[in-house]
Image (cartoon, rainbow, N blue to C red):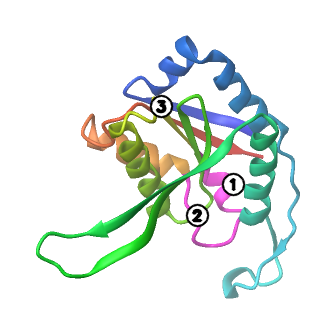
């Protein structure tokens, strides 16, 4: 895979370049090491039988490659209790795909809402002083067209962050848009 665009929000890329250059190199090397073919046969009416890239296979490759470099998934469990509400919800958690040295990485081949939710998770962990920078790795518009419907693309995420200015997320983030 290749990086086609990098976006820095609130100095995310610069923090990595100055304070964590080895991690930035590992991220870029991991992306470059991903090589998959079109293995998913579309069952969608608009593209029945067409060969597509599989988000599941891509996620699996990223997981394998990042774990080889010492990255790990984290889950932060909590119980949901609301004021003046008797229901107590146990077993809730926030999860991040890959973490190393307070750099939090999400690889997102899902719907747009999940890309935006990843930013909220970065904010959550940043507010707890667990994360220094969030890195969101997302497909380009061109790659998304070669995947099943519902997969979003990074250009939309960057466009929206630009319009929100410094208001959300209030955490340093680097968005990396990838393609094959």
Q: Position of residue 154 (x, y in %)?
A: 53, 48
Residue identifier under label 2: 110
Q: Is residue 97 above or below residue 93?
A: above
N-terminal of the pair, mark 3 or mark 2, is 2
How far apart, in angstroms, are the residues tagged by discs 1 and 2?
13 Å
Query: Which residue is at a point 27% across and 34% down the rendered structure image?
Result: 166
- Farthest residue in the left direction? 84
Residue 70: x percent and y percent? 74, 35
**Place of residue 49 in the rendered image (x, y in percent of width and height, measured from the top left):** 83, 82
Most extreme residue toward the top, as rendered? 18
- At a point 53% along the width and 66% down the height, the residue shown is 111
Q: Quadrant of the N terminus?
A: top right
> Which segment did they paint magenta?
137-153
Give the numbered dot on residue 133: 3
Q: Residues within 10 Å of mark 2 (few under 14, many from 20)?
A: some
Question: Is residue 143 on the magenta stretch?
Answer: yes
Q: Are marks 1 and 2 in contact (CB under 8 Å)?
A: no
Can you tell which mark lies on residue 143?
1
| Mark 1 neighbour density, 10 Å: few (under 14) some (14–19) many (20 or more) | some
């Amino acid at each position: 895979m290749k990086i086609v665009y990098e976006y820095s929000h609130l100095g995310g890329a610069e923090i990595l370049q100055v304070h964590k250059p080895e991690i930035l190199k590992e991220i870029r090397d991991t992306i470059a090491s991903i090589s998959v073919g079109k293995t998913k046969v579309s069952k969608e009416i608009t593209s029945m039988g067409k060969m597509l890239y599989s988000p599941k296979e891509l996620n699996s490759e990223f997981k394998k490659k990042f774990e080889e470099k010492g990255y790990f998934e984290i889950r932060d469990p909590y119980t949901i209790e609301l004021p003046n509400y008797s229901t107590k919800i146990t077993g809730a958690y926030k999860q991040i795909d890959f973490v190393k040295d307070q750099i939090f990485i999400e690889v997102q081949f899902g719907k747009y809402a999940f890309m935006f939710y990843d930013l909220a998770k970065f904010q959550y962990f940043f507010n707890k002083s667990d994360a220094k920078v969030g890195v969101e790795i997302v497909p380009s518009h061109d790659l998304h067209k070669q995947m099943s419907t519902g997969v979003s693309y990074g250009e939309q995420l960057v466009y929206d962050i630009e319009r929100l200015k410094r208001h959300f997320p209030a955490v340093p983030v680097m968005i990396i848009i990838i393609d094959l």
